[in-house]
């Protein structure tokens, strides 16, 4: 029963991943084809709650594939990620978006 | 052999033309790219476009064996990109 | 008939996203934003094209190869972009002038360039 539940969670996670992927590409299309660049790039240091290596890897992949963010590096003690965002309006808002949106979803699956 | 769906010719032609234009643009970046990492990015992109060519060609000619190319290119290019980056880093530290 | 339409749409979409990646690599101003275009769009394009191939051939062999390549690409694209961006930051590649902030610059938690702002940008 436990494994069925896990498999179901993983399937839902895959659907979420696909949705994010499509969203990211639509956004990228709009950005690239619009005649004027409306991007505010910036590199933000985000403190993450992921504990072991597996969760960090999953978060790393997920952040790279989500709209407007790209993982650059992991700090030496694996407690922060350096994320390059395309639309960094304010630092805290960007960090909150990553922590509340993506990481929460990820921690549910890879507990 | 006629069990496959019949793809119109203009679809595969348009796909091939789009991929060719993309290949040219990536080549432009490869030649012009101001710094070395730009060129690595362009090489990575060129490999992905080659995989696209192989898939479209496999569909056009109905030969499933051409799909093997994509697997091999994917494996080799990942190692190549990481090796390039490691080489640049090592050169920097020397 | 239905499968023809699906496969044609997938092929055109995959080719379009590959073209989009190339246009983005040309248009974006610096290496980090270029990597945005060169990481997401080709992975999605290959996903669409491989799905088209899997639907078209519909044999066990084609489906396994397609799944293998998709999983491999989606696992390795972030790693490749990570290794490139790391060396780019180490080499002090100049950022676009519109960049809002850089918290990676002179941060003690990761390795920093030993002699900053030298001419390591010059290509050799």
Image (cartoon, coloured by chain):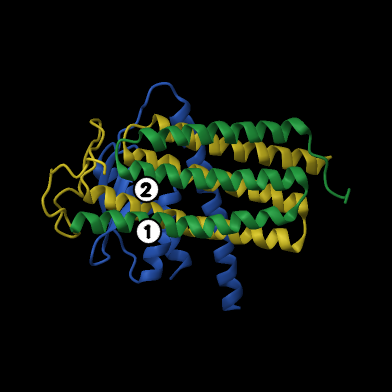
Chain colours: A blue, B green, C yellow
Q: Secondary structure at mark 2?
A: strand
Residue lying furthest left = C115
Alpha carbon distance from label 2 to label 1 = 21 Å
Question: Helix, strand, or loop for circle 1?
Answer: helix
Q: Which dot, 2 or 1, sits closer to the camera? A: 1
Q: Say if residue A102 shows up in the picture.
A: no
In the image, residue A76 sits, relative to residue C58, either above or below, namely below
Residue occupying image coordinates x 16% and y 42%: C119
Residue depicted at x 84% and y 40%? C1
Question: Which residue carries the number 1 mark?
Answer: B83
Q: Quadrant of the C terminus of chain C?
A: top left
Where does residue B27 sit, x and y in percent of width and height?
46, 36
Are the numbered discs 2 and 1 placed on the same chain, yes or no?
A: no
Q: Position of residue C11 (x, y in %)?
A: 67, 40
Residue B63 percent coordinates (x, y): 76, 51
Q: Residues within 10 Å of mark 1 (few under 14, many from 20)?
A: some
**Residue with the mark numbered 2:** A70
**Residue closer to the observer: B46 or C61:** B46
């Amino acid at each position: 029963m436990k494994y069925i539940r896990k498999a179901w969670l993983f399937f839902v996670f895959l659907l979420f991943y696909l949705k994010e992927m499509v969203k990211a590409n639509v956004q990228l299309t709009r950005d690239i084809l619009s005649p004027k660049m409306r991007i505010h790039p910036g590199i933000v240091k985000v403190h993450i709650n992921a504990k072991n290596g597996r969760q960090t890897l999953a978060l790393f992949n997920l952040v790279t594939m989500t709209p407007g963010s790209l993982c650059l590096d992991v700090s030496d003690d694996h407690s922060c990620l350096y994320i390059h965002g395309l639309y960094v309006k304010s630092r805290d808002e960007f960090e909150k978006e990553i922590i509340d949106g993506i990481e929460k979803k990820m921690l549910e699956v890879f507990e | 052999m006629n069990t496959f769906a019949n793809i119109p010719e203009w679809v595969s032609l348009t796909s091939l033309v789009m991929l060719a234009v993309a290949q040219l643009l990536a080549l432009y970046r490869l030649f012009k790219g101001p710094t070395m990492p730009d060129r690595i990015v362009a090489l990575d992109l060129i490999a992905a476009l080659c995989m696209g060519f192989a898939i479209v060609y496999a569909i056009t000619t109905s030969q499933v064996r051409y799909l093997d190319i994509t697997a091999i290119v994917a494996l080799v290019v990942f190692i190549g990109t990481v090796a390039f980056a490691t080489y640049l880093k090592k050169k920097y530290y020397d | 008939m239905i499968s023809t339409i699906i496969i044609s749409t997938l092929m055109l979409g995959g080719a379009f996203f590959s073209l989009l990646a190339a246009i983005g690599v040309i248009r974006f101003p610096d290496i980090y934003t270029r990597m945005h275009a060169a990481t997401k769009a080709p992975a999605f394009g290959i996903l669409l094209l491989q799905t088209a191939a899997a639907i078209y051939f519909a044999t066990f062999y084609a489906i396994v190869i397609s799944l293998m390549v998709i999983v491999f690409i989606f696992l390795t694209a972030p790693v490749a972009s990570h290794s490139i961006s790391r060396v780019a930051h180490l080499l002090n590649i100049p950022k676009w002038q519109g960049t809002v902030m850089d918290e990676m610059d002179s941060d003690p938690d990761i390795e920093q360039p030993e002699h900053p702002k030298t001419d390591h940008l010059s290509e050799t």
